[in-house]
Image (cartoon, grey):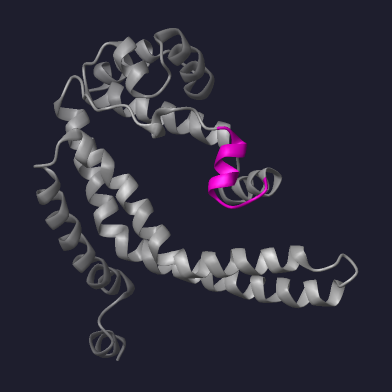
Amino acid sequence: MLGILSKIFGGNKSEKDIKHIQPLVEQVNQHFAAYQSLSNDQLRGKTQEFRGRIKEHLNKLDTRIADLNRQAEELPFSDITGKDVIYQEVDELKKERDEQIEEVLETLLPEAFAVVKETSRRFKENAEIEATATELDRDLSVNDLARRAFMAPRTFARRFRASTGSTPLQWLLHQRVALAQRLLETTDLPIDVVARQAGFGSAPSLRQHFGRVVGTSPHAYRSRLRRAS
């Protein structure tokens, strides 16, 4: 009976997951094939393109939220009821905004995965990758990140920690160390080049942070992997 029901409803959970994921995999592979012809700058520009599409998708809601917040601020301080009514509407719009974010991210998912896949391929197959420096290359403070997320700095830091379990700086550091590990594992790049490509700027900085997170030096990490293989 269980086997019959499984066939009727599409098989077991793993089979259902595969059926759900397979179309996404096909889309990722299609975009991946197309992105191989892009220049490094064009591939990198996909991130800005995605941000623009997300912003466009949320534009009407964000404009409405900003207008309501402005209306609430313009009310007299004594008009607590009026402010409360507006802020309740804002809260509802923010819930709708969260839903729209999920909606647009789901649409972008195959393209985003394809960008990651193609970027990884280029790092693996090339000793160096050159791209034009952009605004994204400068260091961002928590205040910068909070402003871009339309939040107060303390609110942003609190929500970031709740979502990731770490501060923005700690999260960024661990992401850079993880990238350095991948480069050490998959390339023969010199340590100073790994340091630059992982965002540390110099080999001494990489060694300091890598040792703190991984517990060993980049050179020892790579040597251990080679002995194991």
Against 42, is 207 above or below? Answer: above
Please name the residue shown 27% across and 39% down the image: 44
Q: Position of residue 213 (x, y in %)?
A: 51, 24
Count of marks overlaid on the render: 0
Against 156, is 11 above or below? Answer: below
Q: Position of residue 67 (x, y in %)?
A: 61, 67
Please name the residue shown 27% across and 42% down the image: 45
Q: Is residue 60 left or right of residue 189?
A: right
Question: The C terminus appears in which quarter of the rendering?
Answer: top left
Q: Is residue 197 left or right of residue 64?
A: left
Please name the residue shown 37% across and 12% down the image: 220
Please name the residue shown 16% across and 54% down the image: 31
Against 95, is 205 above or below? Answer: above
Asked whether residue 26 is drawn in magenta, I would say: no
- Asked whether 145 or 86 is in front, the reply is 86
Q: Is residue 227 left or right of residue 58?
A: left
Residue 222 appears anywhere in the view: yes
Q: Outermost residue, top direction?
A: 204
- Asked whether 176 or 5 is in front, the reply is 176
Query: Which of the 4 quarters of the picture holds residue 218?
Result: top left
- Asked whether 89 or 221 is in front, the reply is 89
Question: The N terminus appears in which quarter of the rendering?
Answer: bottom left
Q: Position of residue 109 (x, y in %)?
A: 31, 58
Q: Position of residue 163 (x, y in %)?
A: 58, 51
Residue 167 appears anywhere in the view: no
Query: Which of the 4 quarters of the picture holds residue 38?
Result: top left
Q: Which residues are magenta?
A: 141-152
Query: Which of the 4 quarters of the picture holds residue 127?
Result: top left
Q: Is residue 155 left or right of residue 211?
A: right
Asked whether residue 146 is drawn in magenta, I would say: yes
